Image (tube, rainbow, N blue to C red):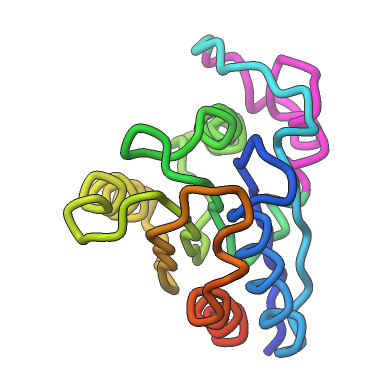
Amino acid sequence: MAKRILILNGSPRANGNTDALVESFTKGAESAGNEVVRFDLRKMDIRGCLGCCRGGKDPAHPCVQKDDMSEIYPEYVAADVVVLASPMYYWGISGQLKCAFDRLFAVAELDPGYANPVKECALIMPAEGADEDNFAPVRAFYEGLVGHLGWRSLGIVYAGGNMDPGAVRDRPEQLAEAEELGRSV
């Protein structure tokens, strides 16, 4: 059964490693008959969460702030799968992705019990470091996030050893891993 996939690309760099992995994932997902919607957060005006807890009153615009998150909210609600794509920044996701993801809380505020919509998800992350210790903090964050949201992880692509912009394009095994994850969704 085809799924609707939302990709939140948190890379601040165009045509870099994250973009290449997202392109490979998308190729695989679409070849399996899935619909993919991608947001390159670097191109969007998304302000940080105010922590006001005043959202959730309008399903069409769940947050009190009016910025480009208004484009993401309906796609997030409709998505079966949410893909978090980000380069590793200080052993975590990029600020762009964290900012957008924090703002998704406004959708949970639509529910009286603050229940988040249940989704499947995946993580795509290129990084300079390639050993398991390098990815341990991200793994802990991702597993904690997925566990607390009650989501189901479909997989993770850690593409280590990629410091230079576009370096992953010279690593066909990493691109193939991202494509296969997309196909398996």
Side (left or right) of 112 relative to 141: right
Instruction: Give the tally of numbered discs.
Output: 0
The percent position of residue 149, horizontal first and vertical second, equals: 39, 49
Q: Position of residue 162 (x, y in %)?
A: 46, 56
Residue at 58% from the left image edge and 71% from the top image edge: 170
Q: Residue furthest left?
A: 133
Q: In this rendering, would 103 be left or right of 62?
A: left
The spot of residue 73 in percent (x, y) is: 73, 41
Q: Which quarter of the figure has residue 183?
A: bottom right
Location of residue 29 with respect to 139 vertically, above or below: below
> Which quadrant of the structure image shows residue 49?
top right
Q: In the figure, 6 relative to 35: above or below?
A: above
Region in magenta: 53-74
Is residue 71 toward the left or the right of residue 181 in the image? right
Residue sitting nearer the eye, 151 or 31:
31
Residue at the image point whose x is 69% and y is 77% from the top: 3
Magenta residue check for 70: yes
Q: Nearer the viewer, residue 172 or 38?
A: 172
Q: Which of 115 and 157 lies nearest the eye of the viewer?
A: 157
Image height of 117 relative to 177, above or below: above
Residue at screen point 59% across, 31% down: 96
